[in-house]
């Protein structure tokens, strides 16, 4: 399964954007919380311009740079590898808005 095969379903686009977000270097759990407070969804985060990302408290220059690179597709190879592992091991991904999330 590659990421291009998933682009047609809104649910799969959400999964891919969440995975891109958690795979982005220098972007940890605290930064993700602050980004979601500012932009609400991973998709919105990746559509945000640099000037908007710079307004997020305690977000490093490296994190901003990496988010912009991720939005341009620089992590697509890593994303494809993660998707293959998820599929091969028949894993279920649970996101924070899911009632099953711990």
Image: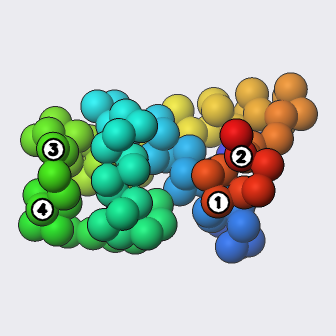
Q: Identify the element where label 3 is drawn.
A: loop
Inter-mark Cα distance, 4 to 2: 28 Å
The mark that comes first in sequence, 3 or 2, is 3
Q: Classify 10 Å Cα crowding around label 2: few (below 14), some (14-19), many (20 and above).
A: few
The mark that comes first in sequence, 4 or 2, is 4
Q: Classify 10 Å Cα crowding around label 4: few (below 14), some (14-19), many (20 and above).
A: few
Inter-mark Cα distance, 1 to 3: 23 Å
Inter-mark Cα distance, 1 to 4: 24 Å
The mark that comes first in sequence, 1 or 4, is 4
Q: Classify 10 Å Cα crowding around label 1: few (below 14), some (14-19), many (20 and above).
A: few
Mark 4 — residue? 55
Out of 30 and 52, give the one closest to the viewer.
30
| Relative to 61, 78 lies left or right | right
Up-down relation of residue 62 to residue 47 (above or below)? above
Mark 2 — residue? 101
Out of 36 and 44, give the one closest to the viewer.
36
Mark 3 — residue? 58
Mark 1 — residue? 97
């Amino acid at each position: 399964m590659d990421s291009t095969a998933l682009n047609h379903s809104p649910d799969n686009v959400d999964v891919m954007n969440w995975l891109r977000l958690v795979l982005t270097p220098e972007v940890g759990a605290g930064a993700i919380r602050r980004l979601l407070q500012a932009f609400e969804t991973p998709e919105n985060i990746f559509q945000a311009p640099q000037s908007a990302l710079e307004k997020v408290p305690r977000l490093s220059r490296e994190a901003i740079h990496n988010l912009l690179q991720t939005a341009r597709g620089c992590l697509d190879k890593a994303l494809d590898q993660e998707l293959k592992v998820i599929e091969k091991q028949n894993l279920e991904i649970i996101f924070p808005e899911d009632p099953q999330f711990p």
